[in-house]
Amino acid sequence: MRTSFGLRLVLLKKAIRRLAVVLVGCLRKNCKRVFQGALIINHQVKIYLDKWSYVMKFKFISSIIVMLLSASVFAGEAKMSVESVEGAKTVDTKEAKALFDKETLFVDVRLKTLSDAGRIAGSILLDYKNGGFTKKALMAEAGVDEGVVIYCNGLKCPLSAAAAKKAISWGYKKVYYYREGYPVWKKVGYPVE
């Protein structure tokens, strides 16, 4: 869809440029003639459209409207995280706090900038998007038989689910998927840093 929109913009720019060149040329010569859909009469420009032009205009305007509507729909919706991850235990904030009290390792998979702005106290940052969440990095913090609570930025952040799937594929047996994540943890008033 981006390609067709970009192509339409290029074609529209070319058409406008071509029309401008024709208009300037004809206005300088004070001419009367018909040129590619523009009727020029003594410094006045009247655009007439044939049947084909109406169809193209309708298609162009309708495609712009469809793109704007679809963009507005997707702009308001962030991708929701999955409710559960196969092989991991999904925990709510109360269960996550119980694991926190047992000193289970919490892994923050958000971007470094978000983690630096605030994270669950004692958690480690393994930035999923920038390649920080690797088997080697996770193994350096916890063995495959140790519990690991993986969280990100709440229900609209799919990173913790993706990270939990990876940890399970690496052989981790006690993976806890904390779907509600940092925003709910902070809202409840649990320890943050």
Image (cartoon, rainbow, N blue to C red):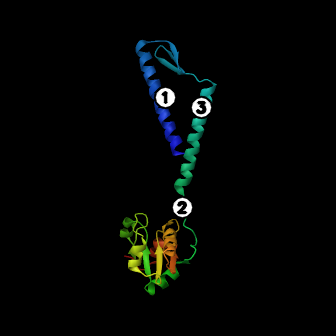
Q: CA distance from mark 2 to mark 1?
A: 38 Å
Say if residue 122 shows up in the picture.
Answer: no
Above or below 90: residue 3: above
**Which residue carries the number 3 mark?**
56
Residue type, mark 3 in image: Met
Quadrant where the N terminus lies?
top right
Q: Is residue 37 left or right of residue 123?
A: right
Q: Which residue is mark 2?
A: 79
Q: Is residue 165 visible?
A: yes
Which residue is at 59% across, 31% downward?
A: 56
Badge 3: residue crowd in 10 Å (few <14, some 14–19, many ≥20): few
Write the residue at 56% across / 77% down: 87
Mark earlier in primary sequence (3, 1): 1
Judge from the rendering whether residue 40 lies leftward or rightward of residue 28; answer left or right.
Answer: right
- The residue type indicated by label 1 comes to Ala
- Report the residue marked by disc 1: 15
Residue at the outermost bottom position: 102
* Residue 89 in picture, x, y percent from top left: 55, 79
